[in-house]
Image (cartoon, grey):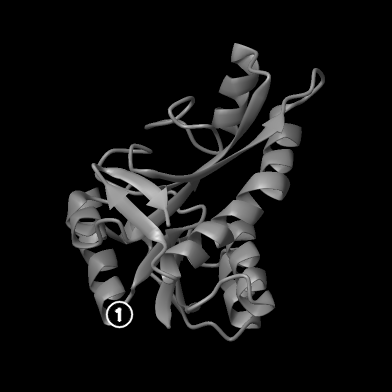
Amino acid sequence: MKNIVVLVSGGGTNLQALIDAEKSGIIKNGRITCVISSKEGVYALERAKNNDIPTRVIPRRNYADSVSYSKAILEALNEEKADLVVLAGFMTILDKCVTSAYAYKIINVHPALIPSFCGEGFYGLKVHEAALAYGVKVSGATIHFVNEEADAGAIILQGTVNVERDDTPEILQRRIMENVEWKLLPQAVSLFCQDRIEIIGGKAYVK
């Protein structure tokens, strides 16, 4: 049984999807053993407590820079004996001290079809604003491994939704969350916990 540590910064809707998937048996051979938040008082912490999942708060604002903060996160992950780290709305880019220590063991969900609308500065509604401004006909989400470069790790799963003519960024965001993120993230986590993701030449393949 693999230990899953989830990193959060906000409301925790993707965390809730993972909790529900674990309870319903969608996630096989893994359990959420800790939720770590970069902010105090966020609702994701309540979601964890309501499901008897231990929590830790490591406030980003208490650290001078990304490196010192990442070292604190790395120490916590080691203490929690994390087998898999899931970034679920975690709003801090981690330094390579974490990504190298947990190479191909950190999964993130990005609300677009990488390599479109991704990288530094593309997060939250900004992603959907950019997609709509470009006039794309489909969008979606990408579940990928995390490396030292923003949104550049090996892609595990992708899913799409149609973009409608009268979509707003908020409407498109909700459609992608409900139809792609909340389904594919637990699926990718389960594949990892069952050792069904293979890395060949820097690309991820499902066995």
Residue at the front extreme of this rendering: 207
Residue at horizontal 31%, vertical 61%?
A: 62
32 lies left or right of 65: right
Query: Label 1's element?
Result: loop
Specify whether 120 is left or right of 149: right
Is residue 206 visible to the viewer in this orientation of the structure?
yes
Which is nearer the eye, 62 or 169? 169
Amino acid type at circle 1 is: Lys
Give percent across and percent down for residue 108: 44, 51
Dot 1 corresponds to which residue? 81
Q: Quadrant of the N terminus?
A: bottom left
Residue displayed at 66% across by 78% down: 23
Q: Residue furthest right?
A: 166
Picture residue at 29% right of the left edge, 74% below the top: 76
Residue 203 position by quadrant? top left
Q: Locate residue 137: give its quadrant.
A: top right
Quarter of the image that includes the C terminus:
bottom left
Whether 121 is drawn above or below 41: the answer is above
